[in-house]
Image (spheres, rainbow, N blue to C red):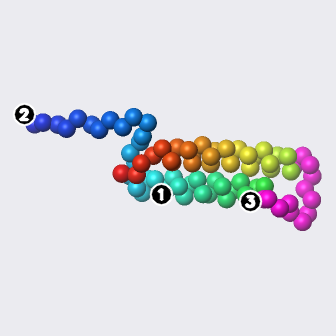
Amino acid sequence: MSRKTPPATCVGELILPVDAFLELRAFHDELISLARTIDPATPPTLKARKAEQSRRRALAKVFRLWAEQMDRSLKAIRPA
């Protein structure tokens, strides 16, 4: 009869292959880059209409919030 080692239980942690972790980190960085492109810290030289600017800010906020959520998740993940 073969003996199986019981799976390691890590409460509150997720073990992930290093490649997958690095891919998620790259995706996180891409989200931040997209948010900066959509709504840069310095306004563009050509003034956008207020409605367009508002939509861009809202979209950038979505990307930033998504990136922040991913960042919290990535901090909880331990590469295997």
The rendered magenta stretch, by its main secondary structure, is classed as loop
In the image, what residue type sits under mark 1? Leu
- Please check the rendered image and state whether residue 41 is part of the magenta-colored stretch, yes or no: yes
- Dot 1 crowding, Cα within 10 Å, few <14, some 14–19, many 20+: some
Side of 2 relative to 74 (left or right): left
Residue 76, given in percent of the width and then of the height, sits at: 48, 44
Residue receiving disc 2: 1
State the image quarter where residue 35 is shown: bottom right
Distance from the alpha carbon under mark 3 to that under mark 1: 22 Å
Q: Which mark is residue 14?
A: none
Residue receiving disc 1: 22
In the image, what residue type sits under mark 2? Met
In this view of the protein, which residue sits in the foreground, 54 or 7? 7
Distance from the alpha carbon under mark 2 to that under mark 3: 60 Å
Residue receiving disc 3: 37
In the image, what residue type sits under mark 3? Thr
Side of 68 relative to 18 (left or right): right
The residue depicted at 58 percent of the width and 53 percent of the height is: 28
Task: Say above or below: 78 vs 34.
Answer: above
The residue depicted at 17 percent of the width and 37 percent of the height is: 4
Of the two numbered discs 2 and 3 on the same chain, state the one appearing first in sequence. 2
Highlighted magenta segment, given as a residue range: 40-52
What residue occupies the far bottom of the structure in this picture? 45
Label 1: state its secondary structure: helix
Label 3: state its secondary structure: helix
Distance from the alpha carbon under mark 1 to that under mark 2: 39 Å
- Dot 2 crowding, Cα within 10 Å, few <14, some 14–19, many 20+: few
- Please check the rendered image and state whether residue 10 is part of the magenta-colored stretch, yes or no: no
